[in-house]
Amino acid sequence: MALPVLSIVYPMADPTETPQHDTIWFDEGTLVAVLTTQPLDRTLDYKAPEGGCWQGAFVEVPLGPRKILGVVWGPGEGGFDLAKARSVTRVLQAAPMQPAMRDFLMRAADYTLTPLSAMLRLATRAPGLGDSPSMRHVYRMGARGGIETGDVGRMTPARQKVLAVLEDFGDLSFTLKELADAADVTPSVVKGLVKLGAVLEEKTPRDVPYPGLDYDASGKALSADQAAAVAALQGDAKAQVYSTTLLKGVTGSGKTEVYLEAVAACLRQGRQALVLLPEIALTAEFLSRVEDRFGARPAEWHSGVTLTERRRAWKMVGQGHAQLVVGARSALFLPFQDLGLIVVDEEHDTSYKQEDGVLYNARDMAVLRANLESAQVVLASATPSLESWANAEAGKYKRLDLTTRFGAAVMPDLRAIDMRAEAVPGGRWVSPTLQAAVNARLALGEQSLLFINRRGYAPVTLCRACGNQIGCDHCDARMVEHRFQKRLMCHQCGETKPMPEKCPSCEAEGRLSAVGPGVERLTEEAEALFPDARVATLSSDMYGSARALKAQIESLAAGEADVIIGTQLVAKGHNFPLLTLVGVIDADLSLHGGDLRAAERTFQLMRQVAGRAGRADKPGVAMLQTHQPEHPVIRAILGGDEEGFWKAEAAERHMAGVPPYGRLVGIVISSPDMAEAFDLGTAMARNAVPLTQIGAQVFGPAPAPIARVRGRHRVRLLVKASKSAPIQAAITQWLAQFKWPNQLRLSVDIDPQSFY
Ligand code: ADP
Ligand code: ZN
């Protein structure tokens, strides 16, 4: 049933076509309120254009000398001379925004205390939405090897770069500019390759529907508890009412297989489905699983997708010509016509929280959106967030459990290595016990993973002469040495500088030394300890593109390395079938965060990492190097009494009145002038009647843990309230009392995940 793309008649979004839902029609010349993407706190009135328009229409309107994007939000407010009103310039060729989407943007704006215009920007993040549909040229890989065979002399470095980009991106098409930019060459290089036949130039409509997914093709034969979970989810899909289900299952239990069947049920209802993944590098594996199951690939939406493809996805989703979207958190803001299912895979993952711009948690917003769309949410994880666990406990979410790994695979055996009893030389991090375990795997031809959650070579560069630690010039943070790049980098602001020869403080030469381990340094150690092994490093910052990273992950999974050195990236759901040993270099690292979720995060991360071992037919072992084997969290990880851990953690949070049993709001005031930030913080803490009225408490002001970032001093306040208190209204009232100078910035984070 997979439809060839071009046999479908190109659908024109006729703006005058009657939408399927209840909405208002505005005759030409009537006053309409338009929400624009400009940072204004209100809608603007315009006259409906020639031919009229629907509520929800995407339009272009004049603002001063410019033309800007907007959505017809409702009837105009008027109250001024109608003759002075300007007209909507034109209605864009896009499906009008659905009422449920308008509600979603408004509710999400209210919840996160974000201006509605900023929400609309999130919902229109595709280029050229206003361009009219037309044909254009796209470029893709021509006959493979077209150049190598014969014309060796014609291969230039610039041409090679173009071919490398095309190779990297597989079957995707580029515009001339995108391809030239991606390869960092001039367009003429691409044209030259077209003449040689190595690159194909084709004419296509700008946006074409995605191939149909064959949801009736049969999936895999399911185990009994997989089948039970699928039956429950499919029942909910048929009901077409809101529900949220926590799908909890150990890594390798078949959660993905199960939710793919939920996707099938949703598509069978004629509705659209969205699968959110926490990491772009995971999409490649998932896409091929979708292709295996449904015979074609879904739409993709994340930062690794070309702008042309993004625009296509946005438009086709709106017109119902994309049945399934796989994407990052921002895919939640796509204009689905009839959304029936949202899957949030690895729902505990902290990257679902957007930490700049609009501060929202995609997991929570998925539940909100599904509520408004009468859709189903599936939250999948081996180690759920305490929030979701508690919602399931309270009966707000349904819960389905997959308790065993699929097939012969069993959960790895978990052991602690007590570092107090190990003789580890200075500047080394792998204990003799762990070393012996890796050697045993090498002898068997099996893979090992050494895990350390720190990028770079070493977290600290210290001058042995004066004791100075090299810091960032703009932040209160130490610079991290990245030896592969031969630079120091600030992980706060991204600033880099070459590794100095002399100490910047005392000018002593040759006295700078690396302190502490990072993933690069551990690689060096592994190469020394295991000279005959193939050692490979997997860290998000070491690959130029998401595609290159994906390729690296695939080759490692296929057995291209004996010892893999990895950061957090490897914990996120990748399949490494040959891996039988996981060694955690420092299991105590995240215990000392002092953060409310330190125990929860350590528990999740350690169990996720351990879950990488022994996925196929060989049993795995996970070894945790720790200085505190008796710590309750370490014991819970080793003991595997998950429910016991969640219950204890829940009881503690309950007592303390913190999430998920209470509500926190993080406030950060930042300014180039420290006193100014503190003065405002103090004034805010003193004048908090709107908060105390609802029983909320204010803590602070205090310097933020990272007290200066990009040259701005940062001061924090924390508001704590009960779950039922109307916190958004109170915060709005509270903040309205203060005036702040222009250079001062205020960020309000409802349900903060990070407290730096
Ligand atoms: P999870 O998402 O829980 O980590 P997956 O869905 O990725 O688990 O399943 C783990 C592995 O087991 C995958 O390779 C998957 O294809 C395989 N698998 C799971 N269930 C089945 C099944 N019913 N039939 C065949 N293979 C399965
Ligand atoms: Zn910095």
Image (cartoon, rainbow, N blue to C red):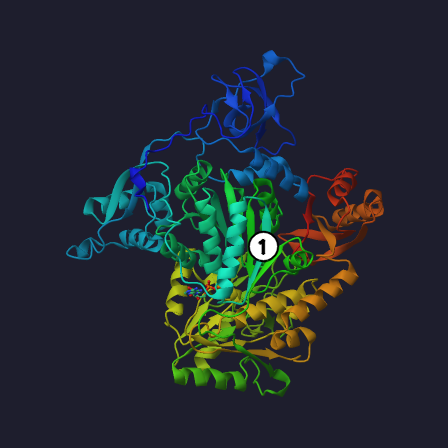
Residue 462 point in image, percent of width and height: 60, 71
Q: Is residue 589 above or below residue 134?
A: below
Residue found at x 49% / y 56%: 259
Residue with the most extreme left position: 150
> Would you say 745 lies left or right of 31 here?
right
165 or 18, which is in the foreground?
A: 18
For the C terminus, the quadrant is bottom right
- Among the 4 quarters of the image, the one containing residue 374: top right
Residue 61 point in image, percent of width and height: 52, 24
Q: In which quadrant of this rendering is ligand 1 seen?
A: bottom left
> Would you say 381 lies left or right of 618 here?
right
685 or 207, which is in the foreground?
A: 207
Q: Is residue 411 above or below residue 36?
A: below
Residue 698 point in image, percent of width and height: 80, 51
- Among the 4 quarters of the image, the one containing residue 545: bottom left
Residue found at x 46% / y 64%: 574
32 or 429, which is in the foreground?
A: 32
Residue 439 point in image, percent of width and height: 45, 85
Which amino acid lies under the numbered mark 1 shown in the image of this protein?
Thr
Look at mark 1 in the image and give the residue it sits on: 245
- Among the 4 quarters of the image, the one containing residue 586: bottom right
Which type of secondary structure does the marked residue at label 1 adopt?
Answer: strand
Q: Is residue 141 above or below residue 608?
A: above
